[in-house]
Image: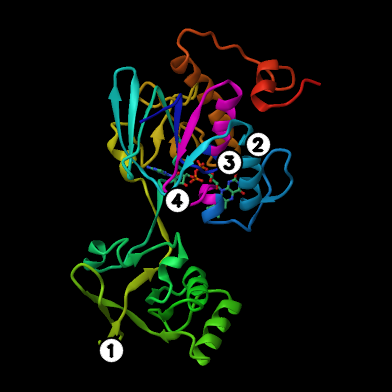
Amino acid sequence: MIKTDVLVIGAGPVGIFVVHQLGLIGLKAEVVDNLDKIGGQCIELYPDKPIYDIPAVPECTGESLTKNLLEQIKPFKINFHLNERVQEVSEEKNNWKIITSKNKIFLAPNIIIAGGVGSFEPRKFPIKEAEKFENNGVFYSIKDKSYFKNKKICIFGGGDSALDWAIELSKIAKVILVHRRVEFRGVEQNVETVKKLEKEGKLKIKTPFQINSIDGQDKINAISIKNEDGNIEKIDTDCMLGFFGLIMKLGPIAEWGLNLEKKHIPVNVENFQTNKKGIFAIGDICTYPGKLKLILSGFHEGALAARACFKLARPNEKYRFEFTTTSKSMHERLGVKDK
Ligand code: FAD
């Protein structure tokens, strides 16, 4: 069990920045995100696109904003628990008990939900049998490519993730790339590379085909794919990888007894607390009159929620407002020398 002052749900820009606000006032935090990387929508949806409305930053990309936010929280040595979804939240005396999809348990007097539009999840294969083989032959992301060495792999999808992995894994495995349309959606260079690799006999392409069924008991032995005319082909394979993009789901947040308004969490704008004491919501997931779904609004919301967390985490101490320019204790926490 991990005890902390604040458990932050979501490692998007707002979840990262609130950790800074918490760290400045001496509160410890742990961050959980369902994705395999930090940055939320900025990294998942628009890493290369320019953003023009971050205060005092005339232009940055989703990726550079994330990088700079991470640089800013470095002094606080925060643990990020990635690839884990917060599943359950329940009350335990004066604390909240939080359980993740990997059965990790946290105990904290405060939870800050910075869950954006909900957790990003991979779109999955449309056949029931795929569930049974998930992480045992059926994958939607790759954590360790050496697992696939010398294996027979079918990669499904027509975008850049499917093409990138088909190119990469064709160096170490037997790859068949399957897509439901004849045309691929990926960048021209990737499309040309897979076609070149096919010509050289380094991978196979099957279009327009979709998954039809999976054969196997404890492991996958073969799959069958079907084209638009209903013709079925059987392929011997060890595993199948699906890259069909991501969907956003509010997911378990809806089951924690919080008031909801059209999939958003209403908050008190004084401190961004929800209807539950010690549970706060900031960023895109919260709602209140006049709410703007902008990163800068989320930063402000985080600053206020962090101060409210102090009261529950340090009930016997008095919170004192201080500026970062002049506060000695903040300088100590940031590891900077007084100037
Ligand atoms: P998110 O970035 O959505 O991050 C939330 C995180 O929470 C996700 O990583 C998710 O996986 C995780 N999560 C959710 N539920 C759980 C759970 N149960 N367990 C674990 N993890 C969970 N804003 C601007 O200010 N300026 C712009 O120019 C701008 N351009 C944009 C362009 C595009 C194309 C898009 C899509 C958005 C743009 N935005 C812009 C909006 C901005 O990206 C959002 O306001 C911002 O990302 C919200 O941050 P967040 O941290 O609240 O949520």
Foreground tag (4 vs 1): 4
Residue for badge 2: 72
Question: Is mark 4 in CB contact (under 8 Å) with mark 1?
Answer: no
Residue for badge 1: 229
Q: Quadrant of the N terminus?
A: top left
Q: CA distance from mark 4 to mark 1?
A: 37 Å
Q: CA distance from mark 1 to mark 3?
A: 48 Å
Question: Which of marks 1 and 2 precedes in the sequence?
Answer: 2
Question: Which of marks 3 and 2 precedes in the sequence?
Answer: 2
Residue at 47 percent across and 82 percent down: it is 183
- Callout 2, which amino acid? Gln
Some atom of ligand 1 lies within 8 Å of the CB belonging to the residue at label 4: yes
Some atom of ligand 1 lies within 8 Å of the CB belonging to the residue at label 2: no
- How crowded pointer 1 is (Cα within 10 Å; few <14, some 14-19, many 20+) is rated as few
Q: CA distance from mark 4 to mark 3?
A: 19 Å
Q: CA distance from mark 2 to mark 4?
A: 21 Å
Some atom of ligand 1 lies within 8 Å of the CB belonging to the residue at label 3: yes
The quarter of the picture where residue 231 lies is bottom left
Q: Which residues are magenta?
A: 16-41
